[in-house]
Image (cartoon, rainbow, N blue to C red):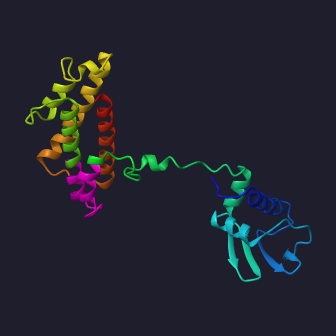
Amino acid sequence: MYNLTPTQKDLLRWFVQQVNQGHLSEEFIISRLLHGPSISGYSGTLPDMKKGAIQALHAEGLLQYEDLGNVDRCTLTGKAYEAVDNNFSAPDTSFVKHLTPLADITNLDEELKQRCLPILGAGSADSKMWDSAVNNACRVLENRLRDVGGVLDANCVGLALVNKVFTDKGTLASKFSIDAERQGYRDLYAGIVGTFRNPSAHRFVDPTPEEGGAFVVFVNLLLRKLEDLR
């Protein structure tokens, strides 16, 4: 949304209305005199046009503005007409941060933070760093699966570990009242093992930062799902 007060929005509406009616040019000069502001070539009654309001419209990209002391040189932008036509209903893009991996690490699993983020501090654009981060994320997930699932055998890894926890006779089978959901968990974690854990454990994968970041965030979700079953 535009960060404007109602008065600032009304001022922009007035500018656009006057231009549309032919009373004002898209480019105009506001002179600040002792008796109040005036606009060159405009003879009608003017609204309140404090310098702060002009600066606010400029900050939102609605007005090009040049401060010449007692004179403000202004030009309406195309965005100004769109804002007025849409009644300032700019789309809310706050969702973007939720779609951007690692944009906000506030709620990231603590162990993931400790095991993955320091590596990336050495070069977040380096695929080799992301390879190490993904490898560590896989190990964090496997260790958590063993911990939450109550599997004491440290040598039980990969698909064998997933089956030990999520088959119909697995250690967490009693947590599910619907067998199809248990099977879904088994398939999900088994898929992670085959798709990410095994390749990362046996060879260099070197994912792109976008792929690596998405995986770390996905592992964070899988850790939460495991904690819900604890």
Determine whether, in the image, residue 26 is placed left or right of residue 89: right
53 horizontally vs 132: left or right: right
Residue found 34% across the figure and 39% down from its top? 221
Tell whether 148 sits left or right of 89.
Answer: left
Q: Up-down: is 194 above or below 10? A: above
Please determine whether, in this image, residue 151 is positioned above or below residue 216.
above
Instruction: Kindly identify the residue that appears in the image at 20 percent across and 29 percent down.
Output: 149
Magenta stretch: helix, strand or loop mostly: helix
Q: Residue 60's spot in the image, x, y percent?
A: 64, 63
**Quarter in which the C terminus is drawn:** top left
Region in magenta? 112-135
Residue at 29% of width from left, 33% of height from top?
Answer: 226
Q: Quadrant of residue 182?
A: top left
Determine the residue positioned at 21% across, 58% down. 128
Q: Is residue 159 magenta?
A: no
Residue 220 at x, y percent in the picture: 32, 42
The image quarter in which residue 72 lies: bottom right
Residue at the outermost left position: 155
Residue 207 visible in the snapshot = no
